[in-house]
Image: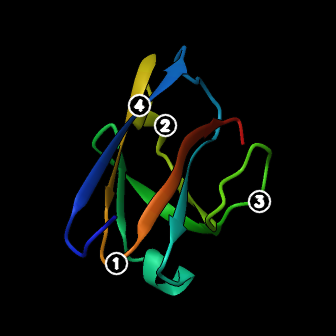
Amino acid sequence: KCRPGSWHTFRIAVGPAPLHQRVIARIGIKGPSVDQIKDWEVRVNRQPAAFTGPATPVLPWSDAPVQAFSVPPAAMHAGNAVVEVGARHEASIHWVEIAIGA
């Protein structure tokens, strides 16, 4: 359960560093509207990720609406990615993934 002002951290294995590929953090969030979620703060490896809107479904998929956040290339490296989500509204997070080459 997310409360306004709370932070939630997720560690995701990404394998080798994604060189010259688009990277998107996809987060399944129940509760707030898309207009509210666009104001949330999302970071990947401490770098801000920009809200880009609802994500296109790819199986397997979350039972919650999934929003996409563009990850800057400098944020990515081999190993794990740490996704931090700063909630601004009451919500629940059901899904977090890093999509490489999306």
**Residue at horizontal 39%, vertical 36%?**
75
User: Which structural element holds mark 2?
Assistant: helix
Circle nearer the N terminus (1, 3): 3
- Rounded to the nearest whole Å, what is the CA distance between mark 4 and mark 1? 25 Å
- On-image quarter of the N terminus: bottom left
Give the distance between the C-alpha atoms of the residues marked 4 and 2, in whole angstroms: 12 Å
Asked if the residues shown at circle 4 and circle 1 are in contact, with their CB atoms under 8 angstroms apart, the answer is no
| Residue holding disc 3 | 56
Q: Position of residue 18 (x, y in %)?
A: 58, 24
- For the residues labelled 1 and 2, the Cα–Cα distance comes to 30 Å
Label 4 sits on residue: 81
Looking at the image, residue 8 sits to the left or right of residue 60; the answer is left
Numbered disc in front, either 4 or 2: 4
**Crowdedness near tag 2: few (<14), some (14–19) or many (≥20) residues, C-alpha within 10 Å:** some
Q: Kindly identify the amino acid type of the residue bearing the numbered disc 1.
A: Glu
Is the Cβ of the residue at disc 2 closer than 8 Å to that at disc 3? no
Of the numbered discs 3 and 4, the one sitting upstream in the chain is 3
